[in-house]
Image (spheres, rainbow, N blue to C red):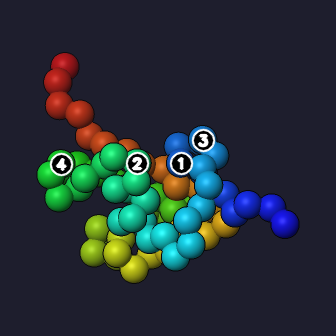
């Protein structure tokens, strides 16, 4: 049996069971309640912030996390 995996910004990660997008962000060290300008796409579909606590990450999913940076 293979270990379930998912991908964050192209890098493979091991999947914890019943992981939501919100759980994943915290596991990746991204705390959206402290930082504004975070966007998440799950399998090329943007997930609204209000859905992060309900959207599940499954085996083989691809997640892109984008954080806006200020500066020039």
Quadrant housing the C terminus: top left
Q: Earlier in the sequence, mark 2 or mark 3?
A: 3
Residue lying at the far bottom in this picture: please name it.
Answer: 54
Disc 2 crowd, CA 10 A, few/some/many (<14, 14-19, 20+):
few
Report the mark closest to the observer, 2 or 1: 2
As drawn, the label of residue 28 is: 2
Residue where numbered disc 4 is placed: 35
CB-based contact (under 8 Å), mark 2 and mark 1: yes
Q: Are marks 1 and 3 in contact (CB under 8 Å)?
A: yes
The residue tagged with tag 1: helix, strand or loop?
A: strand
Q: Position of residue 38 (x, y in %)?
A: 28, 51
Q: Can you tell which mark lies on residue 8?
A: 1
Instruction: Answer whether labels 4 and 3 touch (C-beta < 8 Å).
Output: no
Regarding residue 28, the answer to whether it shows in the image is yes
Of residue 19 and residue 45, the one placed in the foreground of this image is 19
Query: Residue 41 in the image: x percent, y percent?
Result: 46, 58
Quarter of the image for the N terminus: give it: bottom right
């Amino acid at each position: 049996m293979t270990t379930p995996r998912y991908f964050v910004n192209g890098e493979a990660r091991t999947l914890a069971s019943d992981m939501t997008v919100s759980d994943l962000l915290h596991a990746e060290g991204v705390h959206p309640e402290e930082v504004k300008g975070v966007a998440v796409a799950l399998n090329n579909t943007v997930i609204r912030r209000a859905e992060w606590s309900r959207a599940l990450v499954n085996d083989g999913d691809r997640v892109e996390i984008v954080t806006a940076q200020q500066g020039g």
